[in-house]
Image: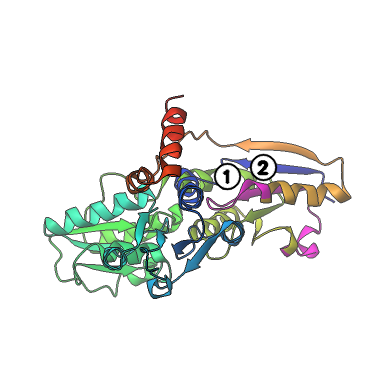
């Protein structure tokens, strides 16, 4: 029977996710529904459903975005990054394009561009089924980079040169997995260089650090996040690396009672794209049967990061009456 719930800190929304959701909600406030979003704005089914209720329409192909006679639709590109050719095509069709790419993903885009211009070949460590690599590869000429997922792919890797090589990584990877892959890359390619700073984002690193600390004190760890969320999957993985049973769940409805056998201390955390209200629902789920459960926080470190909204949204806002009011409110709020 559960006697104590431990909450990881930090957990949940990161600055990039907060910003992406703000972009969609602000676009809905200024332009009104519908606002179209290319791909899930962030990888969480609850966030997507919440925004659908407010008037967002999610598409995977810009052919599904209508072009009304009076002008194009409002189209937001997700936080994961998008091939720039697709964004240019959307603009040519007359759509009002707003790019919600996380600034830390944009950092990797800029690194890839810079290194390729300097004559480097890029070895990118990431997941083939994730949209983030697609955005990175879209920013550089074909044939200037290769993607690998795991360390066991390094030995079979073919590159056009070994003198000028650089490795970059997806922002949401497991630190431990990336470390093993990078070590193998350095052994096989002694001249390979690293980016000036780690590509794995601060939020991913911090949440993994907190998950490890949580797992060491828990009998079971529940991670709230969708299976499409790479960073959420990594939280479950690092918890298991500490020898603790861990499960990734969208919400309390996915709990299997068998998981709770012999569990006295339950650890709870959430991925960078999971809203806090899901944590509250999960806690209430357990408190219904055990109102006296003790609550404690395992704080690994503090976060205080905030990203401004994209310039293209602010510029578009100034072209509408509602937008002018919003811009003034936003300006006053940012000065507080």
Q: Which residues are magenta?
A: 254-277
Q: Is residue 193 left or right of residue 211?
A: left
Q: Which mark is residue 255?
A: none
What crowding class fits label 1: few (fewer than 14 Cα within 10 Å), some (14-19), or many (20 or more)? many
Q: Position of residue 100 (x, y in %)?
A: 40, 53
Instruction: Calculate the distance from the C-alpha at mark 1 to the C-alpha at mark 2.
Output: 8 Å
Residue toward you, 328 or 169: 328
Relative to 166, is 291 above or below? above
Image mark for residue 11: 1
Q: Closest to the observer: 274 or 246?
A: 274
Determine the secondary structure under disc 1: loop
| Residue 200 x/y as whole percent | 39, 50
**Tag 1–tag 2 contact (CB < 8 Å):** yes
Residue 114 in the image, given as x and y percentages of width and height: 18, 53
Task: Look at the image and say whether residue 21 sits in the magenta stretch.
Answer: no
What is the tally of numbered marks visible in this picture?
2
The answer to whether 187 is drawn above or below residue 264 in the figure is below
Q: Identify the residue at horizontal 40%, vertical 43% (top origin).
A: 309
Does residue 250 appear in this view? yes
Query: Which quadrant of the figure has residue 116?
Result: bottom left
């Amino acid at each position: 029977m559960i006697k104590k719930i431990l909450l990881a800190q930090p957990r949940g929304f990161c600055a990039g996710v907060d910003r992406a959701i703000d972009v969609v909600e602000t676009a809905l406030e200024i332009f009104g529904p519908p606002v179209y979003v290319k791909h899930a704005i962030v990888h969480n089914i609850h966030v997507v459903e919440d925004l659908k209720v407010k008037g967002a329409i999610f598409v995977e192909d810009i052919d599904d975005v209508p072009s009304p006679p009076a002008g194009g639709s409002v189209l937001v590109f997700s936080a994961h990054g998008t091939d720039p050719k697709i964004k240019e095509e959307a603009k040519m069709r007359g759509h009002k394009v707003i790019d919600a790419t996380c600034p830390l993903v944009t950092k990797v885009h800029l690194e890839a561009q810079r290194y390729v211009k300097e004559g480097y070949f890029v070895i990118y460590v990431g997941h083939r089924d994730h949209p983030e690599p697609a955005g990175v590869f879209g920013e550089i000429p074909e044939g200037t980079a290769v993607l690998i997922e795991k360390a066991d792919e390094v030995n079979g890797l073919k590159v056009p040169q070994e003198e000028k090589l650089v490795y970059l990584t997806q922002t949401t990877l497991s630190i431990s997995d990336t470390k093993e892959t990078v070590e193998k890359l350095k052994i096989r390619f002694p001249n390979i260089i690293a980016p000036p700073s780690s590509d794995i984002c601060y939020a991913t690193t911090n949440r993994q650090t907190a998950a490890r600390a949580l797992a060491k004190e828990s009998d079971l760890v529940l991670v709230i996040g969708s299976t499409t969320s790479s960073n959420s999957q990594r939280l479950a993985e690092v918890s298991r690396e500490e020898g603790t049973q861990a499960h990734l769940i969208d919400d309390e409805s996915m709990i299997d009672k068998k998981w709770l056998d012999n569990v006295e201390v339950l650890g709870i955390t959430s991925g960078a794209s999971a809203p806090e209200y899901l944590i509250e629902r999960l806690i209430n789920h357990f408190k219904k049967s055990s109102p006296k459960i003790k609550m404690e926080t395992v704080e690994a470190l503090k976060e205080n990061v905030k990203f401004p909204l994209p310039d293209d949204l602010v510029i578009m806002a100034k072209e509408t009456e509602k937008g002018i009011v919003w811009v003034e409110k936003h300006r006053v709020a940012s000065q507080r």
